[in-house]
Image: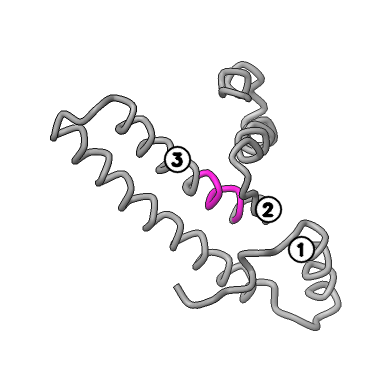
Amino acid sequence: MNENKLVEITPKEWGLLAYLSEINIIDLDNVKASMKDVADYRIIFTEKLLKKAQKLTADNSTDRLIVDRSYYCMHPAARASMYVRMQLDVAKHQLPIAEFKKLLMRTLNDTKLSGMIWTL
């Protein structure tokens, strides 16, 4: 992936971009397209990790190694989802869990489902 500074966007910066779009200084659709490129890169990375986890399963590797690879498939996938849906990039591992629960609540309004997500 080419260096993309949108990977480091903060909620405050997103607010500025939205404002600049409202006053016709930038095209927010172009920004969102670039952000989608970042998310797509993360999904491709996730798919590669998933293939490695599947290979470990086929090779009868230790359960801990398979769980480790599987977890590291989910983390960038969750980050990609929140990045596109919420314009939020959360790198620390416990934050995507909390933010994903918020996303579920906002989109599905399902407290039971969001409560089933593991928290630290």
| Residue 71 left/right relative to 115 | left
**Amino acid marked by disc 1:** Trp
Secondary structure at numbered mark 3? helix
Pointer 1: what residue?
A: 14
Find residue 107 and report its horizontal and vertical position in percent.
Answer: 64, 36
Instruction: Tell me whether circle 3 and circle 1 mark residues in contact (CB < 8 Å).
Output: no
- Which residue in the structure is indicated by mark 2? 88
Image vertical order of residue 44 relative to residue 70, above or below? below
Vertical arrangement, residue 89 with respect to residue 102, above or below:
below
Could you tell me which residue is drawn at 38 percent across and 34 percent down? 68
Q: Quarter of the image for the C terminus: give it.
A: top right
Seen at 61% across and 16% down, the residue is 112
From this view, report whether residue 81 is shown above or below residue 7: above
Q: Quadrant of the N terminus?
A: bottom left
- Of the residues tagged 3 and 1, which is closer to the observer? 3
Location of residue 71 by image quarter: top left
Is residue 18 on the magenta stretch?
no
First reached walking from the N terminus: tag 3 or tag 1 = 1
Q: Residue furthest bottom?
A: 25
Determine which of the numbered discs, if any, sits on residue 109 in the image: none
- Alpha carbons under labels 2 and 1: distance apart: 8 Å
> In the shown orientation, is residue 2 left or right of residue 46?
right
Q: Residue at x 27, y 39 (%)?
A: 53
- Region of the chain picked out in magenta, as a range: 78-83
In which quarter of the view is residue 60 placed?
Answer: top left
Q: Is residue 79 magenta?
A: yes
Disc sitting over residue 74 in the figure:
3
Q: How is the image coloured?
A: one colour
